[in-house]
Amino acid sequence: MMSAIGQLGGRLYRGEVSFDFVGRKRLWYAVSGLILLVSIVAVLVRGLSFSVDFKGGAIFTFPSSSTSVSQVQNAVESGGVSGAIVQQTHGQKNGWQIQTKSLTGAQTVALEKNLSSKLGVNSNDISVTTVGPSWGSQISGKALEALIAFLIVIVIYLSIAFELRMAIAAFIALLHDLVIATGIYALAGFQVSPATVIGLLTILGYSLYDTVVVFDKVRENTAGLLGGARTTYSQAANLALNQTLVRSINTSLIALLPVTGILVVSIALLGANNELEELALVLFVGMLSGTYSSIFIATPVLADLKERQPQYQALAKRVAVRASGGRAARRGAGGGPGPARHGRRVVVRAARRGRTRRRRLHRRGRGDRADRGRADHYGLARPGRVGQSRRVRNRPAWPAAAAAPRWRQHVPAPPGRQEEAALADDLIGRG
């Protein structure tokens, strides 16, 4: 199997096999647009579940061997606190964790006493961690500032290292990954914590790395592209994408294997909503989204932006004209040509036969006959020959040739006719 993948990668790199990613960009745009729409609606309707570190609140942790989730929830509500998140932890034997909104000192003490009495837990075993709302707002502001600074630095770097349009395409791909990851968190109800923000910045960097690798190959394939008429920018970009396709897939799979292992182990051993799970989860979602965007979004967007430039539009027209001419010639050679194509083919064949005959005559030492035939055809023949018109015979005589064998003599054109003779030679050479 690995050898088959390696052969496929080689064939993709040489262009023997190609997937038209750029040509089907409208399909990818539609798929991504649908995913983005669902993500945005999920964020607006369901919202994000922020941890205590962002919104502030209190965390009560205690052990209890003979307690169920419903009993803990009833104890919290009877203590005058609503909307609390109750979950069982695996960090300690039969441990429980309760997350509440911001409480006053009196509310905290009352809830602690109520849990001790209702659940039969020693008050000394209940640990309380309080995070103020100001601290949560500061954390949220710092996370947003870090994200904005990251995006600005990335755009500046790509504009310098590559060009502005590549930076714009990479920025669009990053926003695409950011919105999708956020929408998945909103749909699944995953908790957003500082570890989630760290993982989000990490996967944005990973997605950018994969995009930069593809863009570097695109820049290599499109160097000097405007000087010819063989390939459009979209075709060259699609070739670069195919050449790096196997590498991108292999890199993503290798990166996802340890992340998947961390995610499974953290859920199985540490329970839900632990920091390791939150970090591994955002990495897993972001790597999948980043691989998708670097293949199906970044390069097609770049090709779309470049094809809007006048020079690349002119290149696309030249390539189309060249391709249409080649198709017409192939259709004519395949049989059933129309009158125009048939006539053109006859003329081309006659010109080729004439050129071959002239070369053969020169090789045999009878180049003067070809010269005479050429001169007769263009009205430049020597005067006095049979079959020539009176107008031709009355022209000035040509200068005498040097004393050499007649077939080696170079016969110049008559005075005043050099330009016309040169034009005749050029037309016959082109034929």
Image (cartoon, helix red, strand yellow):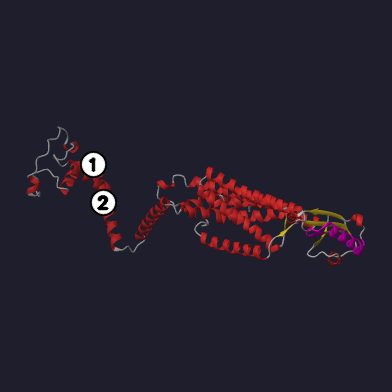
Which residue is under mark 2? 351
Q: Gap in Å between the C-alphas at discs 1 and 2? A: 17 Å
Q: Is residue 5 left or right of residue 400?
A: right
Neighbour class for label 2 at 10 Å: few (<14), some, many (≥20)? Answer: some
Left or right of residue 134, residue 249 in this image: left
Q: Nearer the viewer, mark 1 or mark 2?
A: 2
Horizontal and vertical percent position of residue 302: 51, 52
Q: Main secondary structure of the magenta part?
A: helix
Q: Position of residue 151 (x, y in %)?
A: 60, 49
Q: Earlier in the sequence, mark 1 or mark 2?
A: 2
- Residue farthest to the top, as pictured: 403
Q: How many marks?
A: 2
- In magenta, the rendered stretch is 98-120
Locate residue 423, reporting x and y percent. Answer: 22, 45
Three-letter code for the amino acid on which mark 2 is drawn: Ala
Q: Which residue is mark 1?
A: 362
In this rendering, would 91 be left or right of 294?
right
* Horizontal side of residue 144 vs 324, given as left or right: right
Task: Choose between 235 and 27: the one closer to the eye.
Answer: 27
Q: Nearer the viewer, residue 257 or 87?
A: 87
The answer to whether residue 412 is above or below residue 55 is above
Q: Is residue 330 above or below residue 202?
A: below
- Residue 346 in the magenta stretch? The answer is no
Q: Are marks 1 and 2 in contact (CB under 8 Å)?
A: no
* Label 1 residue SS: helix
Q: Quadrant of residue 109?
A: bottom right
